[in-house]
Image: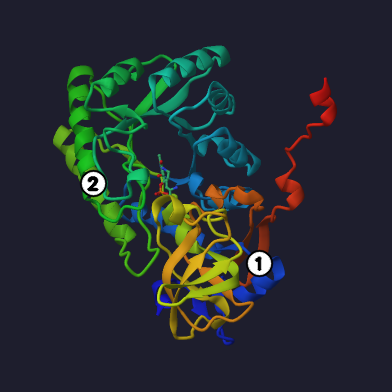
Amino acid sequence: MILDNHPFQTNKRGHLEIGGMDSMELANKYGTPLYVYDVSMIRENCRAFVNTFKELDIKAEVAYASKAFSSIAMLQVVKQEGLSLDVVSEGELYTALQADFPVEKIHMHGNNKSLSELEMAISHDIGCIVIDNFLEIEMIENLLKKYNKTIDVLMRVTPGIESKTHKYIMTGNEDSKFGFNLQNGQAQEAFHLLHNHKSIRFKGLHCHIGSQIFETGSFVMATKVLFEHIAIWNEQDGFVPEVLNLGGGFGIRYTGEDSPLSLHTFVEELVQSVQYHASDLNIPLPEIWVEPGRAIVGNAGITLYTIGAVKNIPEIRNYISVDGGMTDNLRPALYGATYEAVLANKADYKPVNTTSVAGKACESGDMLIWDLPIPEVDNGDILAVFSTGAYGYSMANHYNRIPKAAVVFVENGNDTLVVRRETYKDVVKNDLSYSEEKIEM
Ligand SMILES: Cc1ncc(COP(=O)(O)O)c(C=O)c1O
Ligand SMILES: N[C@@H](CCCC[NH3+])C(=O)O
């Protein structure tokens, strides 16, 4: 049964339950498509990361990668759980400031940070900037002079590792737009600009090899490559990193085919590898920082859709269409990502057919799920797609002028609307008219 692959159950009415709430009641109350998050699951995921490092007695910092899902309410939960925060744009930083997130716990990323983004970060005294390129070093130097400030930074490097994931979400390979290349000398050049800098406090290295990764081998390999360079810089310049940030990328289960490692195993193997190299080099163990996004929110979210048109093409395929699709979940269209779903009102029914779930956007590629085992479908049935908590709402778009869906948090049987559904007024709110008089002028 598909339901067995996911951390949800049915209630007495046979309806899918989330956070102690009947998902059908949520669909009726808020309409569909609807993103629903079980907040206690988000909290558990945050705590699991923090506690795993604690159990291993390792000085660590866990920063939630807010690109996975950023909203004021979400960042308030992250703040309540005491995590740090990774932002990659002015918009994400702005959201963090609106959520009153402690600035000293915010880290800023980005492969093309603008002057105004850096100025916002520096003027608000955020905790750390992860430097990606030479232009950024120059802009940070100028801004620190202007504000007469100093700031902590990490240097992002690409170790030349091809992690086992989709090409579009690999980031540690040599041919990457992210970070300073370790192999071709650029990282070495940047290191010399940053090491012993007067106002840029160079704390250490950052490396993120990709996303939705199920094995530790590529992390261990990346750590080895980082330490080869740390060893050279240690010998030449006495460099001792205070921090090693190994990024995010911890894979989650989308379907029964996915078997993520336990968090404990994952973290333990990363820690052991850093410990091994630090002791080999005879330097103190650096603080280990990580930046999980998907692993914090992915499994905690589901999306509810109303099923509309049903189309059977004999001997070819059965289709059901839902009232959302690539506008609220771009991942299948972008990466061929796979998902599982059940009918929220028949969650414990046995499947009798196979059907493919189409979105409503005007694209043949707008398919949410291919060949899903499903019970008999009736008008008004609600489809619940699992594991949509990461990179769903955050990559939502307005294609076909479809308004963005609402987000509801549920916790201990209480539901709270945390992002309003967009209206058609919202969709045209930035449009200005172009009158005939202008053409005549
Ligand atoms: C620098 C950086 N850190 C963290 C993450 C979060 O990744 P994930 O959601 O896979 O944990 C990403 C996204 O891939 C990233 O680019
Ligand atoms: N958006 C991607 C992950 C990329 C994360 C940022 N480097 C996904 O949905 O899987």
Q: State whether label 1 is within 8 Å of ligand 1.
A: no
Q: Can I make out residue 387 in this image?
A: no
Horizontal and vertical percent position of residue 91:
59, 37
Left or right, residue 309 beside residue 53: right
State the residue in front, 30 or 98.
30
Q: Secondary structure at mark 2?
A: helix
Q: Can I make out residue 112 in this image?
A: yes
Horizontal and vertical percent position of residue 294:
43, 53
Other residues around mark 1 within 10 Å, as few (<14) / some (14–19) / many (≥20): some
- Relative to 101, residue 301 above or below: below
Q: Secondary structure at mark 1?
A: strand
Circle 2 residue: 218
State the residue in front, 280 or 4.
4
Q: For residue 290, which quarter of the picture?
A: top left
Q: For residue 187, which quarter of the picture?
A: top left
Quadrant of the image containing the C terminus: top right
Q: Residue furthest right?
A: 437
Colouring mode (rainbow / by chain / secondary structure / one colour)? rainbow
Left or right, residue 84 beside residue 266: right
Q: Residue furthest left?
A: 280
Q: For residue 229, which quarter of the picture?
A: top left
Q: Amino acid at mark 2?
A: Ser
Other residues around mark 2 within 10 Å, as few (<14) / some (14–19) / many (≥20): some
Circle 1 residue: 415
Horizontal and vertical percent position of residue 274:
23, 42
- Relative to 237, residue 372 above or below: below
Dot 1 or dot 2, earlier in sequence:
2
Question: What is the C-alpha distance between the residues marked 1 and 2?
Answer: 40 Å
Q: Amino acid at mark 1?
A: Asp
- Relative to 157, residue 313 above or below: below
Horizontal and vertical percent position of residue 140:
48, 19
Which residue is depicted at the point 56% across and 50% down?
396
